[in-house]
Amino acid sequence: MGVFSTAAVVGGDQRQHLLAFILAAKGVRVRVFGLHMQPVTGIRCVDTLDEIEDAEAVFLPIPYRNAQGLIATDHGGLPVEQLGRHLQKDGHVFLGRGDIVSNQWQDNGIRVVDLLMREDFQVWNAVPSAEGAIHLAMANADVTLWRSHCLVLGYGRIGKVLADRLSHLGAIVTVEARKPEDIARIEADGHSAVALPKLPEALPNQRFIFNTVPHLILDRPALACVDKESLIIDLASLPGGVDFDTAQEMGITARLELGLPGRLSPRTAAEIVLQAAEAAW
């Protein structure tokens, strides 16, 4: 048995499906709303929110809202306010980017845990994010990463894991950073470093460019320095760090790839959600 005995999984993607199975395997009584899945021992698929009111822990998607501001479900979308009326007082809600609802729900005695604000979750989640980016690079290019020049923009959690994995694959890795201490750390870790003001000098010979910086960094002047054969994979949260319209105009392939853990490594992503949730309980 986990740290809680009852849980509800509401909406989401394959990560949420697998989370329900993992919870049930640990002996948790699981209610699933808004997902088409086969019920098994320990899992009951419900049609109304009334049936999740006994859940000590409620798991929402990460991020919990789609582009329409709704909780994504297999039935379309669920208004956040509608769910709030069915949450158990003193219960826990686990989600991503919960700033909008946190105060409202917490005033009602509900503990909101924004997993994207937890350092443990972000560090664990960096691994499937980085591996997913490498998978996409390999699947969408006609050359190997081995011996290819690869540029990683940003040296945060994902950037560090990504640069390390690329190096082990034999790529020629350069990492961009702003702070002198990050430049030093990049070089100490065995990568080439480039400071932001000198980025245009590093762009022309890069076959793969991975962005992890959550604001515009590859603007029109920067993209003018990028080789047309380059593949840009943007992992940063919306709106990303690339001027995608300009990239398309210039004939440069640029892909905004969000939610890679849930899409490409859903079981690992689900295990990470549960691991962080239990640590936060």
Image: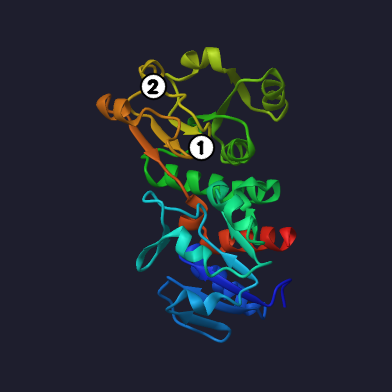
Mark 1: which amino acid? Trp
The residue labelled by disc 2 is 226
From this view, report whether residue 197 is shown above or below residue 243. Answer: above
Residue at point 49% right, 69% down?
A: 17
Q: Give how far across and how far down residue 121 sits, in percent.
A: 65, 51
Q: Residue furthest front?
A: 107
Q: Nearer the viewer, residue 20 or 84?
A: 84
Helix or strand or loop: what does disc 2 sit on?
loop
The residue labelled by disc 1 is 146
Helix or strand or loop: what does disc 1 sit on?
loop
Q: Residue furthest bottom?
A: 41
Residue at point 48% right, 50% down?
A: 259
From this view, report whether residue 249 is shown above or below residue 268. Answer: above
Quarter-of-image position of residue 243: top left
**Observer able to see residue 12:** no
User: Which one is closest to the eye, mark 1 or mark 2?
Assistant: 2
Colour scheme shown: rainbow
Q: Is residue 138 left or right of residue 22?
A: left
Q: Are marks 1 and 2 in contact (CB under 8 Å)?
A: no
Mark 2: which amino acid? Val
Q: Give how far across and how far down residue 181 sits, in percent.
A: 72, 21
Q: Quadrant of the N terminus?
A: bottom right
Query: Label 1, label 2: how many angstroms apart (C-alpha)?
Result: 20 Å
Residue at point 40% right, 74% down?
A: 36
State which tag comes first along the sequence, 1 or 2: 1
Q: Residues within 10 Å of mark 1 (few under 14, many from 20)?
A: some
Q: Residues within 10 Å of mark 2 (few under 14, many from 20)?
A: many
Q: Number of callouts in the render?
A: 2
Quarter-of-image position of residue 244: top left
